[in-house]
Image: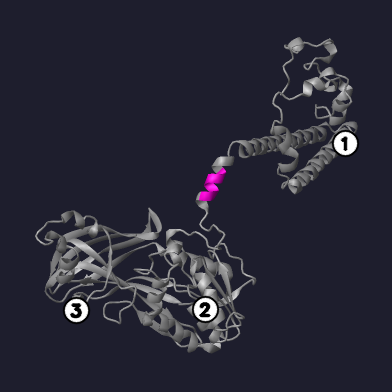
């Protein structure tokens, strides 16, 4: 910016030859039509030599101080590459020019013309490259100025908003609600006391010590470290335990208390952000299952770990899972959970029922409430399935052989641990087995459906990530009611698990 001087407010020049608008003579111009920096420095023109025209209007203008130190020089290699490429094109143009002149000397006008066309083509390429480079340089400059002077506050706010882990003086870090829910003791106590869950992992690992011996194991979402310690006791040479919850601080103490800290190494953070000190691991263990198997979306992270860290001959534990479905009739449960609000000590509280039928209900179902066959909705192979394949839509058919009233569909999952050289372990979270902390998931109808021998439900079940929460699920159920093969009614209802 130029200082506004009272005696020279219109930038009038003492000598016409010193005007800014004056063109440089041919000797001062290079072949690209611009002046070199040396020509400008040695110029006698007043606007170059007189420092009064270089005095900034703004004292300590930040633009005068930022570029040398902060301008991004990370693309230096690309610039060198481009220079080499430019030189090659120039050399090619020079060679083609020589060939064209020689062709003309030999009276081969056609060849000379063809070579000139190639020269023009190469010059066009050169001009386009130079033009693109100028555009990129200008865009980089604009972005730099924008980021340096205009986006500073915005970027700072965004950075703070994106942080899920902020270390404070006490060494704690803040987490989103999902990881924060695993920070306390209560949820881990609940999971550890779930004997079906915990003993299934323990039995698979301990009954297959030959598979774990001298292997490198990755535990995704390690919690208190119980699965990591099972693996270490089974003979694993190294166990890497990853968790993004503050429970990992207690897990480190637990492992040290049990003298396994020479085998187990902890990594605080998301598995997507963690860098392990090895290229590959032999085994991945994880207790990733949520309600209705897929709630919480942790399987996405386990699949990422598999694709990133598992050796080609490695294996996953668990290895397979399956979602199952049936129809239930449990009027007592409906009355206790839903109709209860019709009369509370003589008062109506119907407003408390709002949203109940749109939400899938997680609870225990009585084994006697099952009134249909059990059908499979989705099978997952932990070695093959992708994140995309976890969203699914499938056909289903439920058959009834006795009179009743279908009030809901009930979903749960089974888990399988298998290895070609090992002992298989299974467990189920269904209503007819030992209860687990996962319970079952009920999709309650707006209105019960009368059924009898020969009734069937035939339709589709769609399950995808919830649009408002990638850890939640959106369920869409549609079916037709048949009686002895004749269509009797239709059903359609959506549910959320969030």
Q: Earlier in the sequence, mark 3 or mark 2?
A: 2
Find residue 13 and report its horizontal and vertical position in percent: 80, 11
Which of the two residues, 37 or 319, is positioned nearer the viewer here? 37
**In terms of secondary structure, where does tag 1 sit?**
helix
Q: Is residue 97 left or right of residue 61?
A: right
Residues at badges 3 and 1 in contact (C-beta under 8 Å)? no
Residue located at (24% from left, 74% from top):
365
**In terms of secondary structure, where does tag 3 sit?**
helix
Part of the protein shown in magenta = 155-160
Q: Is residue 85 left or right of residue 144?
A: right
Q: CA distance from mark 1 to mark 2?
A: 80 Å
Report the residue marked by disc 3.
368
Image quadrant where one finds the C terminus: bottom left
Residue located at (13% from left, 76% from top):
402
Q: CA distance from mark 3 to mark 2?
A: 42 Å
Image quadrant where one finds the N terminus: top right
Report the residue marked by disc 1.
98
Which of the two residues, 167 or 435, is positioned nearer the viewer here? 167
Find residue 41 and report its horizontal and vertical position in percent: 86, 27
Q: CA distance from mark 3 to mark 1?
A: 95 Å
Q: Is residue 489 left or right of residue 111?
A: left
Which of the two residues, 93 or 497, is positioned nearer the viewer here? 497
Q: Give the colour scheme shown.
A: one colour
What type of secondary structure mainly makes up the magenta span? helix
Q: Is residue 495 left or right of residue 229?
A: left
Q: Earlier in the sequence, mark 3 or mark 1?
A: 1
Report the residue marked by disc 2.
254
Q: Judge whether residue 159 is colored magenta.
A: yes
Residue located at (76% from left, 24% from top):
55
């Amino acid at each position: 910016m130029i200082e506004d001087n009272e005696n020279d407010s219109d930038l009038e020049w003492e000598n016409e030859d010193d005007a800014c608008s004056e063109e440089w003579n041919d000797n001062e111009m290079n072949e690209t039509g611009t002046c070199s920096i040396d020509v400008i420095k040695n110029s006698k023109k007043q606007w170059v030599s007189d420092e009064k025209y270089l005095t900034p209007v703004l004292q300590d203008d930040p633009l005068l101080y930022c570029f040398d130190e902060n301008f991004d020089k990370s693309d230096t290699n690309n610039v060198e590459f481009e220079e080499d490429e430019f030189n090659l094109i120039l050399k090619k143009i020079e060679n083609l020019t020589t060939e064209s002149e020689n062709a003309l000397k030999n009276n081969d006008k056609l060849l000379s013309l063809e070579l000139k066309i190639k020269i023009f083509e190469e010059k066009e390429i050169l001009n386009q490259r130079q033009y693109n480079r100028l555009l990129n340089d200008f865009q980089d400059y604009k972005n730099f100025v924008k980021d340096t002077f205009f986006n500073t506050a915005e970027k700072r706010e965004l950075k703070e908003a994106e942080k899920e882990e902020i270390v404070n003086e006490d060494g704690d870090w803040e987490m989103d609600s999902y990881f924060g829910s695993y920070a306390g003791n209560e949820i881990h106590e609940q999971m550890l006391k779930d004997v079906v869950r915990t003993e299934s992992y323990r039995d698979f690992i301990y009954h297959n010590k030959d598979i774990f011996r001298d292997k490198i194991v990755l535990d995704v979402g390690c919690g208190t470290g119980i699965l990591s310690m099972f693996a270490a006791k089974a003979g694993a040479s190294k166990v890497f335990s990853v968790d993004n919850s503050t429970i990992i601080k207690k897990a480190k103490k637990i492992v040290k208390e049990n003298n396994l800290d020479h085998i187990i190494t902890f990594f605080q953070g998301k598995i997507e952000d963690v860098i392990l000190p090895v290229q590959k691991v032999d085994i991945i263990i994880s207790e990733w299952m949520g309600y209705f198997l897929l709630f919480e979306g942790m399987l996405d992270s386990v699949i990422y770990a598999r694709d990133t860290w598992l050796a080609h001959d490695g294996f996953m534990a668990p290895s397979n899972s399956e979602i199952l479905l049936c129809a239930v009739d449990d009027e007592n449960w409906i009355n206790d959970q839903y109709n209860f609000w019709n009369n509370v000590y003589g008062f109506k509280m119907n407003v408390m029922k709002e949203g109940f039928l749109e939400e899938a209900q997680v609870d225990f179902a009585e084994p006697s409430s099952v009134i249909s066959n059990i059908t499979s909705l989705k099978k997952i192979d932990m070695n093959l399935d992708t994140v995309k394949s976890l969203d699914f839509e499938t056909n289903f058919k439920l058959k009834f052989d006795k009179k009743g009233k279908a009030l809901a569909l009930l979903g749960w999952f089974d888990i399988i641990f298998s290895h070609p050289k090992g002992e298989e372990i299974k467990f189920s979270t269904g209503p007819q087995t030992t209860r687990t902390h996962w319970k079952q998931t009920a999709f309650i109808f707006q209105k019960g459906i009368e059924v009898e021998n020969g009734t069937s439900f035939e339709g589709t079940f769609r399950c995808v990530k919830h649009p408002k929460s990638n850890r939640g699920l959106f369920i869409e159920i549609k079916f037709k009611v048949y009686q002895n093969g004749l269509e009797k009614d239709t059903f359609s209802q959506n549910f959320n698990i969030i």
